[in-house]
Amino acid sequence: MKHLLQVITWKKCFILSLSILPLLIIFSFYGLYTNKFYFLKIDNYIFSFLMIVHAWFLNALYQLEKEPHIHMNSTRNLEYTMYAIFLVYLFKISETFFILLSYFDYSDLVLPQTFLPIGLVIFGLQFLLLLVTFTTFKHRRERIGPYRFDKVHE
């Protein structure tokens, strides 16, 4: 684990996260089977909203690094929300993996030529986002320390 924290430093976590999130927001509207963008599906907007909450969490961590005691409560609440969002990320990566595995089931049908390349890019970005999010949690624990519950109302 310490080797992972040395390879993906605190700054790299922010840079990677902020570069992966917009790409995944764009790809959340993309339909792999049809090679089209769907802007009228509510599911796509929910996932995009969760990624905006992720960016908000990164901003809160950045502010917490500057002023440790001012933003502690809001960052704690956002981190607990991020644990739930992390589970949604796990669901989305398993869904993408299932779609990619269905390539062999539907090989008789005409799938777009972009199915595998774009699908693998989306899967790779989702996996990298999971890794960076987990690493961000670990870095927060090491750099900022545990949350103090005795100072909840300050």
Image (cartoon, rainbow, N blue to C red):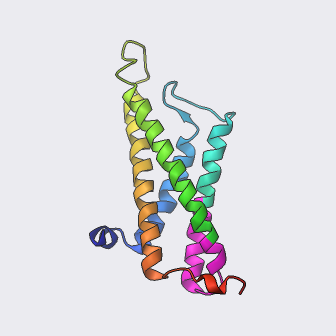
> What residue range appears in magenta?
54-76
Q: In this view, does 122 lie above or below 98?
A: below
Q: Is the magenta stretch mostly helix, strand or loop?
A: helix
Report whether residue 23 is seen: no
Confirm whether the magenta stretch covers residue 62. Answer: yes
Could you tell me which residue is drawn at 62 percent across and 80 percent down? 72
**Residue 17 left/right relative to 9:** right
Tell me, yes or no, whether the highlighted magenta stretch contains residue 84.
Answer: no
Q: In this view, does 32 lie to the left or right of 7?
A: right
User: Residue at the front extreme?
Assistant: 150
On the image, the x and y values in percent for residue 145 come to 48, 82
Residue 137 location in percent, x, y? 46, 68
In the rendered image, the residue lying farthest to the left is: 3
Q: Measuring from the top left, give residue 49's x and y in whole percent.
A: 65, 51
The residue at 47%/75% (across/down) is 140
**Residue 153 falls in image quadrant:** bottom right
In the displayed structure, 95 sits above or below 21; it is: above
**Residue 42 occupies quadrant:** top right
Question: Quick one: 110 or 64, which is closer to the camera?
Answer: 64
Using the rendered image of the protein, determine whether residue 116 is visible from the camera's viewpoint: yes
Total tally of numbered discs in the picture: 0
Q: Which residue is drawn at 42% across and 32% down?
A: 98
For the N terminus, the image quarter is bottom left
Q: Residue furthest top?
A: 108
